[in-house]
Amino acid sequence: MQQIIKNGQLVQESWHLMPKDATLDVLPNSDDIIVPLALWLEHEHALKARDGGLGVWLESDEEIESIAPDSLPLFQVIALNFPAFTDGRHYSTARLLRDRYAYKGEIRAIGDVLQDQLFFMQRCGFDAFAVRPDRDPQAALAGLKDFSVAYQAAADQPLPLFRRR
């Protein structure tokens, strides 16, 4: 199993990320799975009846509003896919999940996730990161401590620096 960064620590991945072309008949009933949004939208009732944990993952062109706010409490994990490190649309999605929808579960960055992005992703509300397979997650962990102080308000610190003094 792959290691991921979760809440500032390296942990063994326990969730199965289902591929985009996954079908309902190949899903395990008792494992913790993260299903693509299209599969959730098509088979919501069957997926709710499973015994294992449930998460959903979104491509960068899919909007969280298609399932929010009604379905959000059903998911223990919401994974947001970054197809390229230059595609930052899910920074806004994470912020919406934390601020507008008050989502308290895990928000995980998947796909082309690099060390240089982790600090900024955390500020937007991400708390778990599956770095690219060709990168060292131990080295990437240092990316969470790139800066000691942030001036602006964000999902991880709602008060700007001048209000914290």
Image: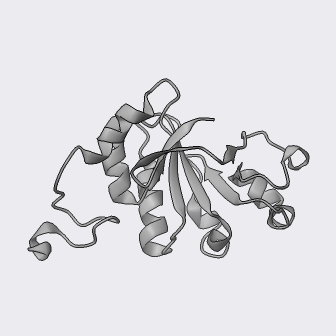
| Residue ID at (39%, 51%) | 8
Q: Is residue 71 left or right of residue 103?
A: right
Q: Position of residue 99 (x, y in %)?
A: 41, 72
Q: Position of residue 65 (x, y in %)?
A: 58, 66
Q: Quadrant of residue 67?
A: bottom right
Q: Quadrant of residue 115?
A: top left
Q: Position of residue 49 (x, y in %)?
A: 85, 67
Of residues 149 and 23, the one nearer the viewer is 149
Q: Is residue 57 left or right of residue 47?
A: left
Confirm whether residue 164 shows in the render. Answer: yes
Picture layout, residue 134 above or below residue 46: above
Q: Is residue 68 left or right of residue 10?
A: right
| Residue ID at (85%, 54%) | 29
Which residue lies most toward the right here? 25
Q: Quadrant of the N terminus?
A: top right
Q: Quadrant of residue 139?
A: top left
Q: Quadrant of the C terminus?
A: bottom left
Confirm whether residue 85 shows in the render. Answer: no
